[in-house]
């Protein structure tokens, strides 16, 4: 048993939390669609991206 590769539980926990963060995901996807084709490089969706992952992180951290 000591020779087995450890399994990272983080991705499984995050997958379980994604349904709770649909609102933030939709906001991020809407932003990405809105800025599609922006050639200037000034528009970005960093805030929405971080909001989504903050929701996931908060959910994961509250799990037992």
Image (tube, grey):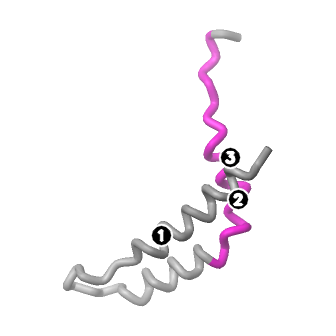
Instruction: Give the left or right position of residue 37, taking residue 62 as reference.
Output: left
Q: Distance of mark 3 from mark 2, alpha carbons? A: 9 Å
Tell me the tag on residue 17. Answer: 2
Q: Residue at x 64, y 17 (%)?
A: 4
Tell me the tag on residue 12. Answer: 3
Tell me the tag on residue 26. Answer: none
Instruction: Give the left or right position of residue 54, taking residue 40 as reference.
Output: right
Provide the secondary structure element on which disc 3 rests.
helix
Q: Distance of mark 1 from mark 2, alpha carbons? A: 15 Å
Q: In this view, does 10 lie above or below 49?
A: above
Q: Is the magenta stretch mostly helix, strand or loop?
A: helix
- Please tell me which of labels 3 and 2 falls first in the chain: 3
Label 2: how many residues lie within 10 Å, few (<14), some (14-19) or many (20+)?
some
Provide the secondary structure element on which disc 1 rests.
helix
Magenta segment boundaries in residue numbering = 3-23
| Residue 16 or residue 57, whichever sits in front | 57
Residue hosting label 1: 49
Label 3: how many residues lie within 10 Å, few (<14), some (14-19) or many (20+)?
few
Provide the secondary structure element on which disc 2 rests.
helix
In the image, farthest residue toward the right: 64
> Is residue 17 magenta-colored?
yes
Q: In this view, does 41 lie above or below 1?
A: below
């Amino acid at each position: 048993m000591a020779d087995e590769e450890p399994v990272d539980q983080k991705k499984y926990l995050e997958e379980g939390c994604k349904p709770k963060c649909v609102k933030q995901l939709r906001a991020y996807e809407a932003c990405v669609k809105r800025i599609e084709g922006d050639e200037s490089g000034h528009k970005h969706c960093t805030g929405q991206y971080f909001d989504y992952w903050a929701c996931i992180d908060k959910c994961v951290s509250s799990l037992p």
